[in-house]
Image (cartoon, coloured by chain):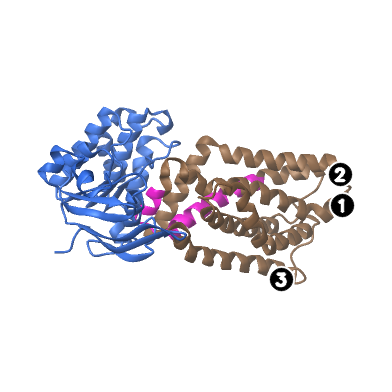
Amino acid sequence: MTPAVQVSSLWKFYGDYPALKNVTLDAPAGACLALIGRNGAGKTTLLRTIAGFSRPGKGSISIFGTPPRDAQTRRFMGYIGHGISVYDELSALENLTLYAKLYNLPDPRGSALEWLERTGLERVKNGLVREFSRGMRQRLAVARAFLHEPKVLLLDEPFTALDDRAIAVLQTVLREALAAGKTIVMSTHQLREALELATHVALLNRGQVAFHGPCTPEMVSDPGWVYARYGEG
Amino acid sequence: MAFARQVFVIMAKDLRAELRTKEAINASLSFALVVLLLFSFAFDPDEETVRAISGGLLWIVFAFAGTLLLNRSFARELNNDCLDALISAPIPAAALFLGKALANFVLVLAVELIALPLFGIFYNVHWTTQLPQLLLVMLLATWGMTVTGTIFSALTVNIRLREVMLPILNFPILIPALLAAMQLTNALIAGQPITSANEAWLKMLIGFDVMYTAVSLVLVEIVLVS
């Protein structure tokens, strides 16, 4: 069976510096792969290359057997990066309607309203994003990423700097996504939150895969176990 | 059809965002008016001098004022990492580029259409004698300016000194289009229509627009995905 995400012998260079060195890993359909590693290990570079924002130096990436920059592939990928990726000058409804149109959803306004309700933002749907609190902006970012019901979710540090309500919203939608058979690849430093959801773990160390395998009970009970066993210590 | 709809969605988004803040358009318009006003005080040109320099003066003002708008085109997407979301959306990079270029075209043209009558007032010039042809030249030259400006705005979006880099990269490329626009504008403001004597400048403008639009549409995917 074709893995949902397959990374084969991937190298990525910034100038002469290899940010990723011969990375090979995969995530089966319906899995949640947690990418862990110290700062600068290459997690964000790997996620951005999988998302198609950046071209591989060598090697290849496929999402359900197709390249990430294929328009059809992008239709079923969702990405949450370090920014919230919504426009401060537009209202919450305008933002979500914009993305719904870009993803060619059949009822852009209806989809936008549905996700505003799911993330508890329906009362402020016409408010400009620049007037939103940080938590509201983060919930809107979650709505933006999930609006088109992606089959593969790429999340870069999704729990970082979230307030309690945004963490609860994100964990709920991620659990629902996993229950619906969707695939998640997330980079994170918050091991406890991530390992609660993860089915697989990959540890990156200086651009290389130090460990890649299923998430075991030892990891869940002691999130530092993988670092202690396979990391630099 | 889907391509045209995607272009329109991007254009509408950019125009809505700009018209809500009016940051770039206010800066661009103010710049154009101040430069026109300062030149009129500084040189106090007579009628003949104005006819000789009108094309050059107008297009230098339009080019610099336009740069203020073009600089914001992709830089606007850096706030909250919106560019990532646009690149990951299932639309061709060409649709993204064309939508942005059209929004820039509307904004730059609006600034020009406000500045032009004021130029007539400040310099006491009857600029409406060949109005339809003057508008044609403005449309063609403005499209050329916005196409190259938009692609260079994408190219320089991640550079720290992008406000400086955009004009440095864009203006040398723009020289043929600006030269043609200046020559034609000089003649049209003096009341002379476009004839076979200066038709070559018009052809150059059209050629410039076609060539740089095609090149930009082909290259934008490579520019955006490094």
A222 left or right of A15 in image: left
In the rendered image, which residue does mark 1 sit on?
B49
The chain carrying label 1 is B
Label 1: how many Cα within 10 Å (few below 14, some 14–19, many 20+) = few
Question: What colour has chain B?
Answer: brown
Q: Residue at x 70, y 59 (%)?
A: B178
Kindly identify the amino acid type of the residue bearing the numbered disc 1: Thr
Question: What range is drawn magenta here?
Answer: B84-113
Magenta segment main secondary structure: helix
Residues at marks 1 and 3, CA–CA distance in whole angstroms:
24 Å
Task: Give a yes or no on whether discs 1 and 3 share a subunit.
Answer: yes
- Of badges 1 and 2, nearer the viewer stands 2
Q: Nearer the viewer, residue B136 or B32?
A: B32
- Does residue A86 lie above or below B11 as drawn? above
* Percent coordinates x, y for residue A27 in the rendering: 20, 55
Dot 1: what SS? helix
Quarter of the figure with the C terminus of chain A: top left
Please tell me the numbered disc located at residue B43.
2
N-term-proximal mark, 1 vs 2: 2
Pointers 3 and 2 in contact (C-beta within 8 Å) = no
Kindly identify the amino acid type of the residue bearing the numbered disc 3: Ala
